[in-house]
Image (spheres, helix red, strand yellow):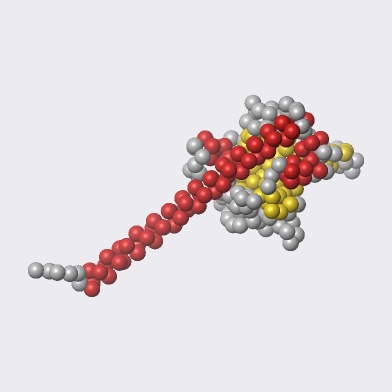
Amino acid sequence: MKHGFTLSEILITLGIVGVVAVLTVPSVMKNYRNRMYVAQLQKIYSQINDAAQAIMNDEHVDSFYETSAIAKNVCTKNEDAAEDAPAEEKVTCTTAGNEYFLTKYFKNIKKNCSQGNNQCVGSNYTALDGQSLGHLGGYCVQTVNGATVCSYYHQPTNVLNIAVDVNGPAEPNIAGRDFFTMDIKRDGSLSDYGSGSNDPSVAGISAENCGVKADIYRTAAGCLTSVIEAGWKMEY
């Protein structure tokens, strides 16, 4: 009667287990990280929405675009811009409103940290396919939860654009993984980036465009919609 395993049987079994682990562990780890990114995204998404509602309530207005988050941004015409230049290049806006909103209505550990020794953004962002997107600018803060929130006021469309790195400067710094962009609507709600309007009924860039290479903001556009439409899951 056989009472045990031979050494060769044990080695074969260990080899099979090793092969299975090599094939499955990376996928399991990727799914775990994606779930973590989505959980962090959902949390900061809610915080941004709450902050927009809070400033509207504090200042007793019905539109986010009547608050100090916008009013403190002073925009002046750029006389040196070419006649056929894009609309955003024809004006220069300060970040006073952005700074007021992000520093007063979020609990931060870092402020004005898009560059320098206090930097709270990645040194280089990439698309899902690995193509470089460069550095993230704008006025940025890092929250106590570790997320980085940056804002840019697009005066031609009267829209405050928001960029979020859900885990701050930590890798992977990939648009659609830990980096997302969105627009704040006049009622304080959020849409994906690229809506071109603060009207709540106007949607941002569709999910089909998630990861399509463009500038740093637009490459991330569509990914927020994709995650939400999938029931707060990252299925791409």
Q: Quadrant of residue 159?
A: top right
Q: Is residue 163 above or below residue 55?
A: below
Where residue 119 sits in the image (x, y, percent)?
Answer: 71, 57
- Residue 45, picture quadrant: top right
Image coords of residue 14 (percent x, y): 30, 66
Q: Residue at x 39, y 61 (%)?
A: 22
Residue most extreme to the right: 79
Q: Please tell me which residue lies in front, 202 or 187.
A: 187
Q: Is residue 138 visible?
A: no
Can residue 120 be seen in the rendering of this structure?
A: yes
Going by the picture, which residue comes out furthest to the left? Answer: 1
In-image side of 30 versus 88 (left or right): left
Residue at the front extreme of this rendering: 58
Is 128 left, or right, of 200 in this rendering? left
Q: Quadrant of residue 182?
A: top right
Question: Which quadrant of the rendered structure holds the N terminus?
Answer: bottom left
Where does residue 174 sit, x and y in percent of width and height? 59, 51
**Along the viewing direction, whichever of 104 and 222 lies nearer the viewer:** 104
Rendered location of residue 49, percent (x, y): 64, 36
| In the depicted structure, whether residue 123 falls above or below residue 64 | below
Image: 7 above or below 37: below
Q: Residue at x 56, y 42 (%)?
A: 42
Residue at the image point whose x is 52% and y is 49% from the top: 36
Residue name at image x 83 percent, y 41 percent: 93
